[in-house]
Amino acid sequence: MQVLAFLALAGGATAYAYSTGTGEVNTPEPTGNIATTAVAGAQPDWNSIVSGNITVSGNVSTGDLFEITPAEGLAEYLQVRVYLTNTGSLLKAYSHLSLNVYLQDSVEASGSPDYRVLSLENGSATLNLPPGVEGSKTLSVVGGSYQLVSDNTTNWQEGWTVVPELYPEVGQR
């Protein structure tokens, strides 16, 4: 009852008290790269879409994109994100583009589906390598589809391209 009387007199105004403390967090100094990346040799043949008879829609060319090599003895998950960096130019040729990207020995590789979709709409795809994975791992396009604006390139806006520019980024999770 005294609390209710206090609240009525205080008009609902109350005070809060808290305490803070300080501490020290030790973070190790980086000793080198967590991974290296290299462009893979067997890239998809993107230009096949516009060579010969142009098909307005179809399946994308498959092939390897990058080789990802984790540092030896890494005890953390690695997050591999691949970005589509030239969407503006691609949108002048494609009304739809989706790439199914697969990373060898990734967490996703053992799931269903075993790939992630990278499209004009989402702009990036993320895959994860578990701790202890050793050796070079291949990031590949294993499928996908496209729809072109038209089967006549003269109908496409100036500055068009059918070749996606992709950028890999590797970080610790």
Image (cartoon, helix red, strand yellow):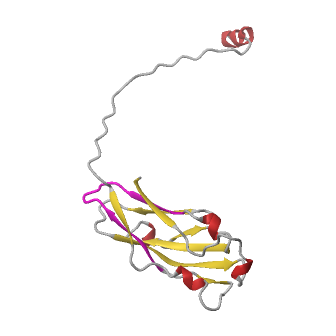
Q: Position of residue 1 (x, y in %)?
A: 69, 12
**Which residue: 60% across, 76% down?**
162
Q: Residue furthest bottom?
A: 53
Q: Position of residue 169 (x, y in %)?
A: 44, 58
**Which residue: 63% across, 67% down?**
89
Question: What segment is highlighted magenta in the picture?
Answer: 63-84
| Rendering quarter of residue 52 | bottom right
Q: Is residue 150 above or below residue 3?
A: below
Q: Is residue 162 above or below residue 21?
A: below
Is 64 inside the magenta-drawn segment?
yes
* Left or right placement of residue 171 versus residue 45 in this view: left
Is 29 inside the magenta-drawn segment?
no
* Left or right placement of residue 129 versus residue 122 in this view: left
User: Which of 163/17 is in front?
Assistant: 163
| Rendering quarter of residue 25 | top left
Q: Number of numbered discs present?
A: 0
| Rendering quarter of residue 78 | bottom left
Asked if residue 112 shows in the view, the reply is no
**Which residue: 61% across, 62% down?**
122
Q: Position of residue 163 (x, y in %)?
A: 56, 74
User: Which of 13/75 is in front?
Assistant: 75
